Amino acid sequence: MTTRTTLRRTNIGHSKSVEALMVHITWTDAKVVRIEARKDFTLAAHTVKVLHNEYSVLADVPVNVKTGQVLYFVESKDFHGWYYVLTYNGVSFSCSCPHNYHFHKTCEHQQHALVFVGHRYARENAHRIEVEHFIGPEWELHISDELRQAKQERAYE
């Protein structure tokens, strides 16, 4: 006759799929923050456990940021003052939240960053269009190439 051994329950900790990289920002209450590194620096980030809308800070994680790198921070809707870290690769945003980072799903933070960038781009173009309308005919010959290029860019938007 065989004897049965029972398995003992062991506490192996939480899954990595509930961890997020977050930054605590106290100097603003904006929903989305954009930074561009002027020189190399180390960002003081934190690993945060996000489980059923409960947040607990697990560890400090230094993140090396290179000169010229652009980072976006989007505030958590339930953990005020704490921001997810997003990067843009020219095509899409990647977010440090568990939903996107571990499961490769589109998250609401990416949508907020996309809207932020869209508004910023629209403001820059609106200023450029206003400036084009104030140009007098005597200056138009000098900058006709720039005006033609701007009109073409607007046609493709």
Image (cartoon, helix red, strand yellow):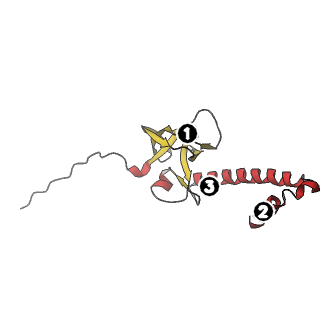
Q: Which mark is residue 149?
A: 2
Q: Nearer the viewer, residue 120 or 107?
A: 120
Going by the numbered disc 2, the residue's amino acid type is Gln
Q: Earlier in the sequence, mark 3 or mark 1?
A: 1
User: What separation in Å lies between label 2 and label 1 (alpha carbons)?
Assistant: 33 Å
Residue, x 89% and y 55% (percent of image)?
A: 133
Residue, x 52% and y 40% (percent of image)?
A: 40
User: Which residue is most to the right?
Assistant: 137
Going by the numbered disc 1, the residue's amino acid type is Lys
Marks 2 and 1 in Cβ contact (< 8 Å): no
Residue, x 47% and y 42% (percent of image)?
A: 64
- Circle 3 residue: 111
Going by the numbered disc 3, the residue's amino acid type is Gln
Marks 2 and 3 in Cβ contact (< 8 Å): no
Based on the displayed image, in which of its 4 quarters is residue 88 positioned?
bottom right
| Residue 30 x, y percent position in the rendering | 65, 40
| Residue 16 x, y percent position in the rendering | 39, 50
| Residue 96 x, y percent position in the rendering | 50, 49
User: What separation in Å lies between label 2 and label 3 (alpha carbons)?
Assistant: 30 Å
Q: Earlier in the sequence, mark 2 or mark 1?
A: 1
User: Which residue is most to the front?
Assistant: 142
What SS does tag 2 mark?
Answer: helix
Q: Which mark is residue 59?
A: none
Q: Which mark is residue 39?
A: 1
* Mark 2 Cα-neighbour bin, 10 Å: few <14, some 14–19, many ≥20: few
What SS does tag 1 mark?
Answer: loop
